[in-house]
Image (cartoon, rainbow, N blue to C red):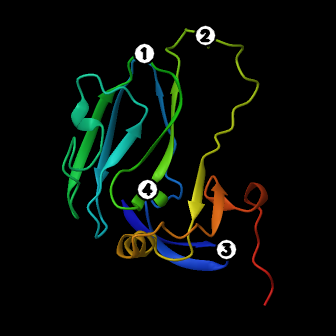
């Protein structure tokens, strides 16, 4: 987990990323695989990762909700998530599960069928991963802190994103100055 300067909608700002990527990397696994993800926290925020939709059978400590199934990973510390994909296949996602870091710390989790087991439908001709998100020009922690302070809803995002990019299929360009 590290900070990286990212530009969207003609604004640059440091955001929390995984491996310097926004969105984070896509994780591929097969049904029956054991997934090991070593996370080292290099940012000032404590955080955890939630594996959205994964059935945590006998691995509840790997589920990720901070202060519920695990303590958040502190700055400078590491934690290895270790869980087995049991009876699942499909496209899921993972995300930070503390504060509003989920606005920039997220990615796809694609679970393929076991080897030599066909899809339960005709094999796709082509696969493209699309992950939807939002972008705020301001710091996302400031957005949620203001909402908590005022008792109101958080400000609307400045853009919706597809694979981290705003605009029609990620084609937004800044106007010439």
Question: Residue drawn 20% across and 45% down?
Answer: 70
Check disc 2 and report the residue beneath it: 118
Check disc 1 and report the residue beneath it: 87
Label drawn at residue 20: none
Occupied quadrant, residue 56: top left
Question: Residue drawn 76% across and 72% down?
Answer: 173
Check disc 4 and report the residue beneath it: 102
Say whether disc 4 or disc 1 marks the residue closer to the N-terminus. 1
Is residue 104 among what the camera can see? Answer: no
Q: Nearer the viewer, mark 3 or mark 2?
A: 3
**Residue 170 location, x and y as percent?**
73, 59
Quarter holding the C terminus is bottom right
Question: Looking at the image, do the residues carrying marks 3 and 1 touch, with CB atoms under 8 Å apart?
Answer: no
Say whether disc 2 or disc 1 marks the residue closer to the N-terminus. 1
Compare residues 49 and 151 and report the one nearer the observer.
151
Instruction: Determine crowd level at label 1: few under 14, some 14-19, many 20+ residues with C-alpha closer than 10 A.
Output: few
- Label 4 to label 1, Cα distance in Å? 27 Å
**Residue 139 location, x and y as percent?**
46, 75
Check disc 3 and report the residue beneath it: 9
Question: Residue drawn 57% across and 78% down?
Answer: 12
Is disc 3 placed on a helix, strand or loop? loop
């Amino acid at each position: 987990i590290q900070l990286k300067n990212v530009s969207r909608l003609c604004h640059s700002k440091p955001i929390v990323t995984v491996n310097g990527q926004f969105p984070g990397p896509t994780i591929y696994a097969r049904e029956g695989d054991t997934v090991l993800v070593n996370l080292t926290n290099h940012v000032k925020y404590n955080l955890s990762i939630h594996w959205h939709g994964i059935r945590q059978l006998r691995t509840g400590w790997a589920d990720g909700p901070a202060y519920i199934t695990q303590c958040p990973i502190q700055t400078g510390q590491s934690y290895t998530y270790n869980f087995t994909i049991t009876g699942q296949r499909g496209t899921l996602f993972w995300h930070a599960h503390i504060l509003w870091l989920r606005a920039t710390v997220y990615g796809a989790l694609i679970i393929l069928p076991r080897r030599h087991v066909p899809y339960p439908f005709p094999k796709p001709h082509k696969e493209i991963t699309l992950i939807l998100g939002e972008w705020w020009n301001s710091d996302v922690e400031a957005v949620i802190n203001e909402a908590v302070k005022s008792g109101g809803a958080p400000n609307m995002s400045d853009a919706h994103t597809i694979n981290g990019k705003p605009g029609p299929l990620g084609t937004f360009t800044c106007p010439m100055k």
